[in-house]
Image: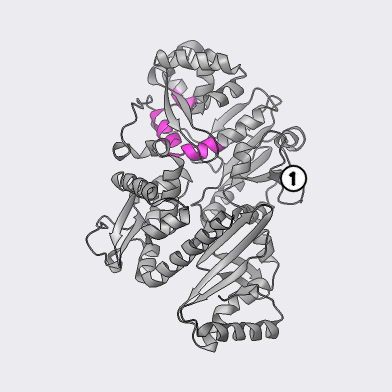
């Protein structure tokens, strides 16, 4: 049991399978040890269902467990609290990052199947999420980039990483293909071997699955080859200990969702709850019908989930030309902490304010969130984009296509460089569909004001610049089609004519569709 206590002090909130693997014990032995420790109130558990993986209980030391570990090691409780991530402060941080932590732990468990035993250091504020030391002293760092982490915040994190000592190899985990490719370009400057993978591959792939890529070569790698051939010496970075280190608090019995503390919500919410919350946060101002269609949920199921999330003050139903959903400040903080993004920046951009309640019409001018205010100001445009996407996704699902990626405007933007300098395109949405081995990608542009030829040329110009480079294929792995939806069908043939003329003039082909 001592080895189980020690491992849980090093890596709180492991599940039993991860604990067995990392402790080097048979599963049956680990299960019995955890059961005894929980019965003696030396460890406590929280339930958790990650996006990639089965439902499980995750275990951490209680205050009594910390005291027992200090006694076993012949040290003091204060020394344990300062040297291991078991304090009440650490407990709260790790619970807030539980979804991210589950992915990081999956990667560490895979590494441990190659090299046993491993030593692990978790980080509070350092750019790394974790660093692993394998038996011969070589080190591997792990960084997960979350859904809400934008280009600027990731670059800031990367620059901070570059200023300090580095492990012998770095593993980066990305939420989708676009950001994985974006990361490849930014990671070529690192002075140690770097490998990147998609979340779903990193979290579920066996040790010999080649899910990892290098930013500089086209070959793919598995964890076994990374550990055995590519990880060099390196350093495990240190960070300043927290000023306050108190004993962990009781996790208690999980109450109803509405009464759950914010830091316990990642364990209390199920994957469908989180999907609904992510869609509302990505598309604030979405109607219930459009949100339901985007998610592919039945009306009764969606209503039940939405009611639960409203009771927990995670989403708000507002009245603005109909009933609409927006994320609450509590939800914005929850998702920012999950992804190690700025809570204050998230709220500055997307906060609906405390007075956003259904039944009282919302004045967009009074909405504190800068980006949300713009979306609500142009609610007809916002609503049309949501409705078109909902219809498109519903139709795709009926013909066997799956939604791989759906990015709102603030994530759909693409920044690139051409001969005239830094450029960008800002579509209203980006969508990736897959069926079997086929993949399709789309930029969506909804145009209400492009009624004159000069305006049409102005709307096409950024795409002509973008498609004159190799970036459309480099960014997505497949060349996206540009869907331009116009409000008046009479305008569509004129827009097509202008587009053909501009493509002939510039010699640039845009895979354009103006339905």
Question: Residue 406, percent across and down?
Answer: 53, 57
Out of 195 and 80, give the one closest to the viewer: 195
Q: Residue at x 45, y 57 (%)?
A: 293
Out of 40 and 255, give the one closest to the viewer: 255
What is the residue that sits farthest to the bottom in this orientation? 453
Q: Residue at x 63, y 42 (%)?
A: 201
Question: Residue 98, percent across and down?
Answer: 47, 37
Q: Is residue 361 left or right of residue 160?
A: left
Q: Hey, which quadrant is residue 166 in on the image?
A: top right
Please give the count of numbered marks on the rendered protein: 1
Which residue is labeled 1 in the image? 220
Does residue 382 belong to the magenta stretch? no
What is the residue that sits farthest to the left in this orientation? 360
Out of 447 and 196, give the one closest to the viewer: 447
Regarding residue 226, the answer to whether it shows in the image is yes
Question: Residue 411, percent across and down?
Answer: 52, 60
Q: Which residues are magenta?
A: 81-103
Q: Residue at x 68, y 58 (%)?
A: 477
Q: Is residue 480 left or right of residue 30?
A: right
- On screen, residue 243 above or below 271: above
């Amino acid at each position: 049991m001592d080895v189980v206590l020690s491992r849980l002090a090093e890596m709180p909130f492991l599940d039993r399978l991860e604990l067995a693997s990392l402790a080097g014990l048979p599963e049956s032995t680990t299960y019995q040890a955890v059961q005894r420790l929980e019965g003696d109130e030396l460890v406590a558990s929280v339930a958790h269902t990650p996006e990639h993986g089965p439902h499980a209980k995750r275990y951490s030391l209680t205050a009594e467990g910390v005291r027992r570990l200090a006694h076993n090691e012949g040290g003091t409780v204060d020394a344990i609290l300062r040297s291991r991530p078991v304090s009440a402060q650490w407990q709260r941080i790790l619970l807030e990052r539980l979804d991210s932590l589950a992915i990081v732990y999956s990667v560490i468990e895979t590494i441990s199947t190659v090299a046993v035993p491993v030593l692990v250091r978790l980080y509070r504020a350092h750019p790394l999420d974790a660093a692993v030391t394998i038996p011969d002293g070589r080190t591997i760092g792990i960084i997960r980039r979350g859904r809400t982490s934008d280009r600027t915040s990731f670059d800031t994190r990367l620059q901070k990483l570059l200023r300090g000592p580095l492990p012998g190899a770095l593993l980066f985990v990305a939420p989708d293909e676009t950001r994985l490719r974006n990361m490849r370009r930014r990671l070529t400057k690192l002075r140690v071997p770097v490998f990147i993978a998609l979340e779903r591959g990193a979290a579920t792939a066996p040790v010999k699955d080649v899910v990892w890529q290098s930013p500089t070569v086209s070959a793919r790698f598995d964890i076994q080859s990374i550990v055995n051939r590519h990880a060099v010496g390196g350093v495990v970075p240190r960070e300043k200990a927290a000023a306050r280190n108190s004993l962990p608090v009781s996790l208690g019995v999980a109450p109803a969702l509405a009464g759950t503390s914010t830091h316990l919500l990642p364990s209390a919410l199920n994957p469908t709850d989180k999907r609904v919350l992510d869609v509302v946060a990505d598309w604030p101002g979405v109607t219930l019908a459009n949100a339901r269609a985007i998610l592919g949920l039945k009306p009764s199921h969606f209503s039940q989930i939405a009611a639960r999330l409203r009771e927990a003050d995670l989403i708000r139903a507002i009245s603005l030309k109909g009933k609409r959903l927006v994320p609450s400040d509590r939800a914005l903080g929850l998702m920012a902490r999950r992804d190690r993004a700025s809570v204050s920046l998230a709220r500055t951009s997307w906060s609906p304010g405390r007075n956003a309640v259904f039944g009282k019409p919302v004045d967009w001018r009074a909405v504190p969130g800068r980006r949300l205010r713009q979306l609500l100001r142009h609610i007809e445009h916002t609503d049309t984009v949501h409705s078109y996407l909902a219809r498109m996704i519903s139709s795709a699902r009926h013909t066997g296509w799956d939604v791989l990626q759906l990015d709102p405007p603030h994530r759909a933007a693409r920044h690139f460089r051409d001969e005239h300098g830094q450029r960008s395109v800002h579509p209203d949405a980006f969508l990736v569909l897959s069926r079997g081995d086929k993949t399709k990608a789309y930029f969506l542009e909804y145009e209400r004001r492009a009624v004159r030829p000069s305006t049409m040329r102005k709307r096409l110009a950024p795409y002509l610049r973008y498609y004159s480079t190799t970036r459309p294929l480099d960014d997505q792995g497949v060349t996206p089609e540009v869907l331009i939806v116009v409000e008046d069908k009479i305008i569509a043939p004129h827009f097509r004519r202008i587009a053909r003329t501009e493509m002939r003039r510039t010699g640039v082909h845009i895979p354009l569709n103006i339905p």
